[in-house]
Amino acid sequence: MTQILNSYACDQWFVPSSGLVDIVSAIDGRVVAQASSTGLAMDAMVRHARDVGGPALRALTFHQRADILRALAGYLGEHKEQLYALAADTGATRRDNLNDIDGGIGTLFAYASRGRRELPSEHFVVEGAPEGLSKGGTFVGAHILTPLHGVGVHINAFNFPCWGLLEKFAPAFLAGVPVITKPATATAYVTEALVRLMVASGVLPAGSLQLICGSVGDLLDHLSGQDVVSFTGSLETSEAVRNHPALSRHAVRFVAERDSLNAAVLGPDAVPGTPEFDLFLKEVVREMTVKAGQKCTAIRRILVPRAVESVVAEALVAQLSAIRIGDPRAEETRMGALVSRAQRKAVLDAATAIAGEGEVLCGSLDAPEALDAAHPGGAFLAPILLRCAAPLTAHHAHATEAFGPVATLMAYDSLEEAVALVAKGEGSLVASVFTYDPQVAAALVFGIAPYHGRLLMVDRDCAKESTGHGSPLPGLVHGGPGRAGGGEEMGGLRGVFHYMQRTALQGSPGRLSQLTGSWIKGAPAPVSPTHPFTRDYDALAIGDTVETGARTISLEDIEHFAHFTGDTFYAHMDEAAAKANPFFPGRVAHGYLILSFAAGLFVDPAPGPLLANYGLDNLRFLKPVSPGDAIRVRLTVKQKQAGRKPEYGEVRWDAEVFNQSDETVARYELLTMSARPVA
């Protein structure tokens, strides 16, 4: 019995009964599922996301949302084999699905880690340091990032039914914005199974994720300026979505990842026999055959020095001709099928247009009769290597993407020409440079960087651990400029911040300190009746301060510190040489002596809730300290953040060191861990 795909709307599974569209297997053409969104109330889905999902997510801190992502990733990892079994019918081999399924799960883990490590245990982010806006310091400004009160609408491509959903979902969820995801129908049966697992995990808040199997219907009509549309697919469809009247009318945020003529450039030093030459061949073949070339980051243009063009062509033809094509479930298969025969026809049509500007070196532009005979109903296609005769004047080689196992070889005569050829792609997601010559690397990288979201530099030193041309590590930029679009997979916290509003706050230091939970100089700093180090994490309040007595630094202190540490720099030991230095009035105290004496002034020596000092941030020495100067310290609780374990919390202190004239001689942030009461 053919599976009818369900949508997940308003926290319920919806079973369509009309308008069903057949989805066929890429292996043998049999119908594996049917999909339709007829009957789905798109306006209700949007309302549910805004009224239920949004408030539920915004009630959680970044750390709580990160913990949910980690738990979700763990659950999916335990149940991923059922996704592997389904995904074979998309034409993908197990190696291909390692990128899609395990890669998607790994992305959840990566965002969970970054959320815990780089975001506060709060509902907002304070971006950057506060800025003084008045002479007297009573009026200051700060920037905050808060979650949008809308929904993230994700329209995904067919080639990555799992990773495509998860790499968009993770940053939106971490930001606190609910998601409505719409997978490409051709592989929606894998995505539906993924969403079923996500729902079954029981960790997702109500309304945080909804699924549309079928068309988006009138979904876009119900969006507003608080919503985000993220699209992955063709240039034509992207333009249709971008120009939708509702998106224009309400200034809906829109990001897209679309057709990308990615390039790989072989440096003139990487001649046959060098590791870089061999790595180049290996990477081109890999990128042409993984996922049968159905990757937005696959190598489409192969740029080589004219002197080695024929050698590269011969080597690539030999390696591509040896690729074993067949049932992706078979262990010996190196390349599976395209997602459908319709997609195969589109690839052949595009390859034919490109070949009109050159020649076919490997493969065929005709229907693959032998493969069809071996796999009736399948969508198999052997790799096609083209050669562009005149790349500087060609059009299709730089403008037409054959979204399959197709790439075009083109020769260049100089590095300047190589840069010009890459630029003709009008902006791509990624490009690779293969060279061991630093001057070649600099010329190519800085020449083509403005046209790319990511550049991969491959040589013998990094090849062993490189993730490859088409596989960025989670957290790196994945979007690109120009025709490639500014993909939602922006990488790291940039992707999270895309779902947040940046707002400038202006007011008194005290008011901004209260709002942001971060003490700002000029805000109240009450001196505590008891030393803050004697109070546990929960008992500390932002602004709690200790002010120390003074300690005079003698010449003997400076000399003892110099000999004890071995730091006998002339500014501390030679009066005449120190006076000749434009920064010092004579011999001065070591900066680290000042820090050490400062710690001696503010540390409470008895055992207590303060567990450890784990670092300093933003240290600056602002004024020299001469023998006979007296220093004192003001230490203020600047920020608090829950620790990774419930037994402790992390406290950031503002430390300011003054001399006897109340001038600041040093300033830094002290990082400590303080115990919390254990229930």
Image (cartoon, rainbow, N blue to C red):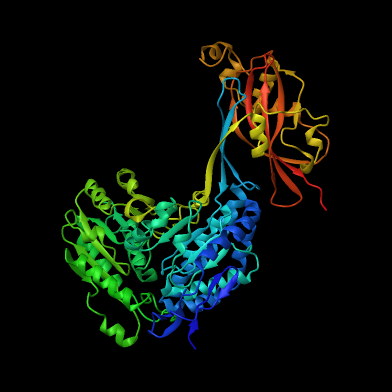
Residue 337 location in percent, x, y? 36, 77
Residue occupying image coordinates x 36% and y 60%: 238
What x and y, as percent, mark residue 637?
Answer: 71, 34
Q: Position of residue 414 (x, y in %)?
A: 21, 48
Q: Is residue 483 above or below residue 670?
A: below
Residue beneath the point at 64% across and 52% down:
63
Percent x, y of residue 189? 48, 76
Asked if one can make out residue 467 in the rendered structure from this viewpoint, the answer is no
Number of marks drawn: 0
The answer to whether 365 is drawn above or below residue 32 in the figure is above
Can residue 570 be seen at all in this image of the molecule? yes
In the displayed structure, would residue 88 be above or below residue 677?
A: below
Q: Is residue 27 above or below residue 508?
A: below
Among the 4 quarters of the image, the one containing residue 588: top right
Q: Residue 513 vs residue 439: left or right? A: right
For residue 530, side relative to residue 198 (left or right) = right
The foreground one among 535 and 238 is 238
The reply, left or right, for residue 358 in relation to residue 247 is: left
At 26% from the left and 71% from the top, the residue drawn is: 384
Q: Nearer the viewer, residue 546 or 389?
A: 546
Which of 377/594 is in front? Answer: 377
